[in-house]
């Protein structure tokens, strides 16, 4: 399947934890908002550590930039009541989308353990949020086995459970090769999943950082990518390589019928903006002015 349509795009931001980080976030939002994302999402710190900051960032992006925002919410370290109160506070702020996640192990713990009065897993959270009727729910998906998963099939089976529990769509962990996504998408279709599965795209800001991130979340790094970055770093052109590899990945995905791309911006606008421009996604305001 091929498509020539301009894709819908969306951006992930994280809440700032310092004044300097705040400036970086707002500069990033300001730079990327003219690309008119279909939604933007704001992460929820590990162990719920950014609860208030996430709320502030979500509410500000929604109110000041008029963007449709999906607030991330996890089950970690909170009772069901507390988690549902946070969801209600999003609804009160006019937010209608949530990225509903189980979350990782709380700090110091080896594996995820549910709070005694909390949601045991992502499905329980999704069911409770779906029951409110207030939110469009997105969930995480894993084209390569999640570190807690016994197999690729287990991730597909669990994603089916999450969709059946009330999720509208899924956003994937990042990956390096389009075939990784297509294999996963095919396996999901085979399992009867017909909800949209949006590929998560990481425009690489720092190769070292990307390697650390990949190791933590189970994303495999193809040898050809590692070799290309090692060489590019020696020649001081890793930014150029990052932009072209990411653009090529997105083009391959679009060629294969993908209609939405979700960018992990890491609160830096340049690489995401350059990739979007290379894909023909340009600021609508500029075009309107030209017309
Ligand atoms: P799930 O999909 O529920 O579980 C992951 C895998 O574990 C499943 O595919 C399945 O194989 C297995 N599994 C889990 N529970 C069960 C069960 N009960 N029965 C059978 N199998 C099970 N983390 C944050 O802390 N904050 C964020 O804001 C955040 N945003 C994210 C956004 C996206 C798009 C993604 C992909 C991940 C994000 N994460 C975030 C990371 C996420 O919290 C971790 O990957 C976490 O370990 C899994 O959360 P999940 O809801 O995706 O898990």
Image (tube, rainbow, N blue to C red):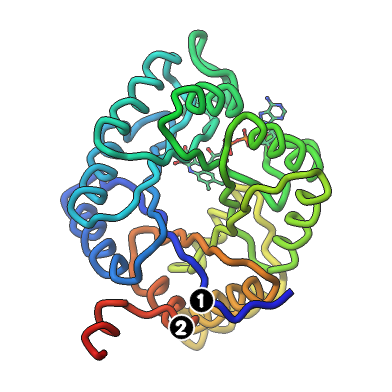
Tell me residue 143's x, y (percent).
70, 52
Q: Ligand 1 falls in which quarter?
A: top right
Which residue corresponds to the image point at 31% horizontal and 77% vertical from the top-left? 284
* Residue 230 visible within the image: no
Contact check, label 2 and label 1, Cβ < 8 Å = yes
Marker count (numbered): 2
Of tags 2 and 1, the one toward the viewer is 1
Mark sitting on residue 6 = 1
Task: Tell me the distance, in whole angstroms, between the alpha carbons under discs 2 and 1.
Answer: 7 Å
Disc with the residue nearer the chain's start (2 vs 1) = 1
Q: Quadrant of residue 1?
A: bottom right
Q: Does residue 115 appear left or right of residue 251 in this picture?
A: left
Q: Quadrant of residue 82?
A: top left
Tell me residue 105's x, y (percent).
53, 29
> Helix, strand, or loop for circle 1?
loop
Which residue corresponds to the image point at 73% horizontal and 40% vertical from the top-left? 155
How crowded pointer 2 is (Cα within 10 Å; few <14, some 14-19, many 20+) is rated as few
Q: Does residue 52 appear left or right of residue 148 in this picture?
A: left
Which residue corresponds to the image point at 58% horizontal and 56% vertical from the top-left? 198
Q: Which of 265 and 72 is in front in this view?
A: 72
Which residue corresponds to the image point at 40% horizontal and 55% vertical from the top-left? 39
Where is mark 2, residue-wise? 280
């Amino acid at each position: 399947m091929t498509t020539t349509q301009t894709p819908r795009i969306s951006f992930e931001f994280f809440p700032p934890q310092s004044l300097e980080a705040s400036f970086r976030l707002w500069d990033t939002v300001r730079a990327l908002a003219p690309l008119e994302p279909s939604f933007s999402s704001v992460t929820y710190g590990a162990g719920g550590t950014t609860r208030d900051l996430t709320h502030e960032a979500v509410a500000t992006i929604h109110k000041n930039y008029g963007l449709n925002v999906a607030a991330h919410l996890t089950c970690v370290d909170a009772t069901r009541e507390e988690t549902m109160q946070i969801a209600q506070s999003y609804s009160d702020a006019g937010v209608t989308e949530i990225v509903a996640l189980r979350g990782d192990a709380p700090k110091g713990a080896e594996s995820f353990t549910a709070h005694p009065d909390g949601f045991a897993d992502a499905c329980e959270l999704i069911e409770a949020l779906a029951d409110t009727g207030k939110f469009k729910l997105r969930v995480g998906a894993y084209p390569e086995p999640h570190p807690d998963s016994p197999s690729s099939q287990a991730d597909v089976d669990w994603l089916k459970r999450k969709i059946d529990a009330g999720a509208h769509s899924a956003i994937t962990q990042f990956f390096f090769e389009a075939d990784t996504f297509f294999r996963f998408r095919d396996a999901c279709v085979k399992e009867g999943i017909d909800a949209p599965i949006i590929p998560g795209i990481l425009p690489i800001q720092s190769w070292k950082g990307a390697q650390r991130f990949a190791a933590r979340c189970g994303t495999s790094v193809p040898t050809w990518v590692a070799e290309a970055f090692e060489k590019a770093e020696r020649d001081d052109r890793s930014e150029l390589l990052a932009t072209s590899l990411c653009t090529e990945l997105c083009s391959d995905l679009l060629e294969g019928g993908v209609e939405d791309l979700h960018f992990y911006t890491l609160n830096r606008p340049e690489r995401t903006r350059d990739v979007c421009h290379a894909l023909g996604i340009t600021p609508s305001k500029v075009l309107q002015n030209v017309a």
